Image: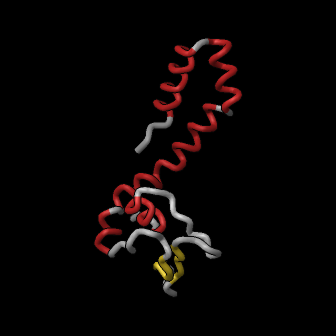
Amino acid sequence: MARLDSKIEAHLGRKVNFSPDGGEVHLTDDGSGVAVISEWNAPEPQPTEAELSAADGSASTAEANVDVIANRQKEYGSVEEQIEFITENGLTPWQTKVEEIKDKYPKV
């Protein structure tokens, strides 16, 4: 089961500011370790429990892919390193390298 913040972002289809100081959505612990929405300031209507439950699958996938994306970015290197590789080796070898990295770290 995905975290509440992930389900909210999956439902809205965008990143959400959860900052306690001026954020769009404030989450608090209900006292038993479960996160609940304590304040909703986002421009969209607050999702229902059913809508959040429906977003659980895509939210779980997004959470699982966080490490995959971080690993890929690390292997791609900085933008400067990528440009240098392409300049020295050409675009086709870069595309091959990207496919190898994606195969090494497949998304869920």
Where is the N terminus found, in terms of image quarters? bottom left
Query: Where is residue 37 drawn, in percent x and y?
Result: 47, 78
Query: Where is residue 107 drawn, in percent x and y?
Result: 43, 41
Residue 74 visible in image:
yes
Residue 44, placed above or below residue 66: below
Which image quadrant is residue 97 in?
top right
Residue 48, placed above or below residue 75: below
Query: Where is residue 9 drawn, in percent x and y?
Result: 45, 61
- Going 66% across and 19% down the picture, which residue do you hit? 85
Given residues 17 and 99, the one toward you in this image is 17
Locate residue 42 relative to residue 89 in the image: left or right: left
Given residues 50 and 67, the one toward you in this image is 50
Query: Where is residue 31 drawn, in percent x and y?
Result: 51, 87
Of all residues shown, which one is farthest toward the bottom? Answer: 31
Where is the C terminus found, in terms of image quarters? top left
- Going 66% across and 15% down the picture, which residue do you hit? 87
- Going 37% across and 62% down the picture, which residue do you hit? 11
Residue 85, placed above or below residue 67: above
- Going 46% across and 52% down the picture, which residue do you hit? 64
Q: Tell me how the rendering is colored.
A: secondary structure
